[in-house]
Every structure is written in structure tokens, then in C-alpha cells.
Amino acid sequence: MKESLSYNGYEAKLDYDAEDDSFYGIVTNIPDTIHFQGRSIDELREEFKISVETYLEHCAKIGKDPNRPYSGKFVLRVSPELHRRLAESAKGANESLNALATRILESAE
């Protein structure tokens, strides 16, 4: 069984509850809670879509901006000199500039 589902950028982790003999899932890439369940994989997929759409409709109804998943992409402007130094560092470390930047950003958390 695939352990996750994706719908309109929302990612959900899936699991099975043997006691209830049902599948369930929870959206993992936003702070708000969206959960769903189903007796079959097809039902689980459909309930996931319904739950996301219900969440978006509810947010619109109460005037709240819904949490949207981040794409993982952003543009960063730096000086040409810094760009050159970072590119050289990445090359020296035998990694991509993206991998170097990710590593530096993660160490700053």
C-alpha cells in the first residue's frame, strides 16, 4: 500500500486501523488539521479530496486564508560575488549549489 496521497498540493500520511477495519489519513504539510477515513483505498482517496475541498470551503466561509502547502522553491537574490563564492564552495564540496544552500539554511534553524 502506498503510504501517502497528494491532492492539489496537500500531502496526507495514511495508516490502517485493524480494530476498526478502516483506513485513515491526516494532511501533514500544513499546520491546520485535516483528517479523513474510509473502508477501502478508493473510499479513502475520495474522502481525502472531499476533506480538502471542505476545508477550503470552510475557510472561505469564515473569511480565513487557508493554509497552503509550500512548494519548496523560492528565489534568493545575492551579489554576484557571493554567488561566485557559493558556487565555488559547492563545486569544491562536490555538491550542487542548491544542496549547499539547503545545508546552510538547515544549519541556521
Image (cartoon, rainbow, N blue to C red):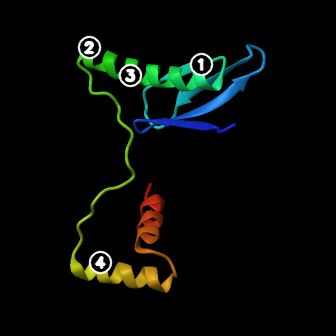
Question: Dot 1: what SS?
Answer: strand
3 and 4 marks in contact (CB < 8 Å): no
| Farthest front residue in view | 42
- Give the residue at mark 4: 83
Marks 1/4: CA distance?
Answer: 48 Å
Task: Please state the horizontal and vertical placement of residue 69, each as a whole percent of the image.
Answer: 39, 39
Identify the residue shown where x is 66% and y is 17%.
39
- Give the residue at mark 1: 37
Q: Residues within 10 Å of mark 4 (few under 14, many from 20)?
A: few
- Left or right: residue 89 compared with residue 59: right
Instruction: Report the front residue among 89 and 61.
Output: 61
Identify the residue shown where x is 42% and y is 82%.
89
Q: Which amino acid does the dot numbered 4 rest on?
A: His
Mark in front: 4 vs 2: 2
Q: Earlier in the sequence, mark 4 or mark 2?
A: 2
Mark in front: 3 vs 4: 3
Quarter containing the C terminus? bottom left
1 and 3 marks in contact (CB < 8 Å): no
